[in-house]
Image: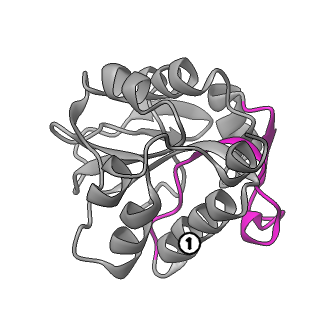
């Protein structure tokens, strides 16, 4: 008998609701599927077939990228690039807590705040058309926030763990996207 492995892990509803509470809505989920969108309900989404890495990321983005191989580095890099260009006006990135990686260091340098979760998130998995809770996640997680609502992000996400701000961001108030700065 072959061992079946879940490819798609879904974000539990309470974290999506928190992201919506901070950002107002999710305009784009760039690493998703039609099945996941029954749960996430983003305005737009990109599937593996669409190759979200080749698409433009605009508006309020929620990203829970694939953690396999170099994909996590590519997706986090794309999020930073979209923030720096001003295409992404606000974003929340849920990923594994890997503070020793180059992608973490690069992403944290451009994020407005980071929530280190207390405990591990029990993700949801798709098995035979059913969504079930994954009971034994192997790594801790964190949320990167990109945007100007740092106080609101802190208030909402503090429920899930400690929220910190990168040192450079503390001295760069107010935090705004490139478009917000250009339109000021």
Query: Which quadrant does the N terminus fall into?
Result: bottom left
Q: Residue at x 29, y 47 (%)?
A: 165
Q: Does the rendering let one see residue 27?
A: yes
Give the quarter of the image for residue 100: bottom left
Q: Which residues are magenta?
A: 42-68
Q: Which residue is mark 1?
A: 77
Location of residue 79 in the rendering, given as x and y in whole percent from the top left corner: 60, 61
Q: Does the rendering let one see residue 1?
A: no
- Please tell me how crowded label 1 is: few (under 14), some (14-19), or many (20+) other residues with Cα within 10 Å: some
From the viewer's side, name the closer residue of 74 and 180: 180
From the viewer's side, name the closer residue of 170 and 136: 170
52 within the magenta span: yes
In the image: residue 46, left or right of residue 134: right
Location of residue 149 in the rendering, given as x and y in whole percent from the top left corner: 49, 30
In the image: residue 26, left or right of residue 158: right
In the image: residue 24, left or right of residue 109: right
In the image: residue 81, left or right of residue 92: right
Vertical comparison of 177 with 74: above or below: above
From the viewer's side, name the closer residue of 155 and 1: 155
Vertical comparison of 72 with 46: above or below: below
Vertical comparison of 151 with 147: above or below: above
Location of residue 122 in the rendering, given as x and y in whole percent from the top left corner: 30, 37
């Amino acid at each position: 008998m072959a061992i079946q492995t879940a490819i798609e892990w879904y974000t539990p509803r309470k974290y999506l609701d928190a992201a919506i509470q901070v950002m107002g809505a999710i305009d784009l989920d760039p690493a998703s599927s039609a099945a996941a969108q029954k749960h996430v309900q983003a305005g737009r989404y990109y599937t593996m077939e669409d190759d979200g890495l080749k698409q433009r990321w605009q508006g309020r983005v929620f990203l829970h990228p694939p953690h396999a191989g170099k994909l996590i580095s590519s997706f986090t890099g794309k999020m930073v690039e979209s923030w720096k260009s001003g295409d992404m006006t606000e974003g929340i990135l849920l990923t594994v807590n890997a503070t020793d990686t180059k992608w973490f260091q690069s992403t944290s340098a451009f994020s407005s705040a980071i929530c280190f979760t207390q405990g591990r998130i029990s993700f949801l998995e798709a098995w035979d058309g059913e969504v079930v809770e994954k009971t034994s996640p192997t790594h801790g997680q964190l949320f990167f926030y990109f945007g100007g609502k740092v106080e609101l992000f802190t208030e909402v996400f503090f429920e899930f763990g400690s929220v910190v701000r990168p040192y450079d961001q503390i001295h760069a108030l107010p935090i705004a996207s490139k478009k917000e700065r250009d339109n000021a």
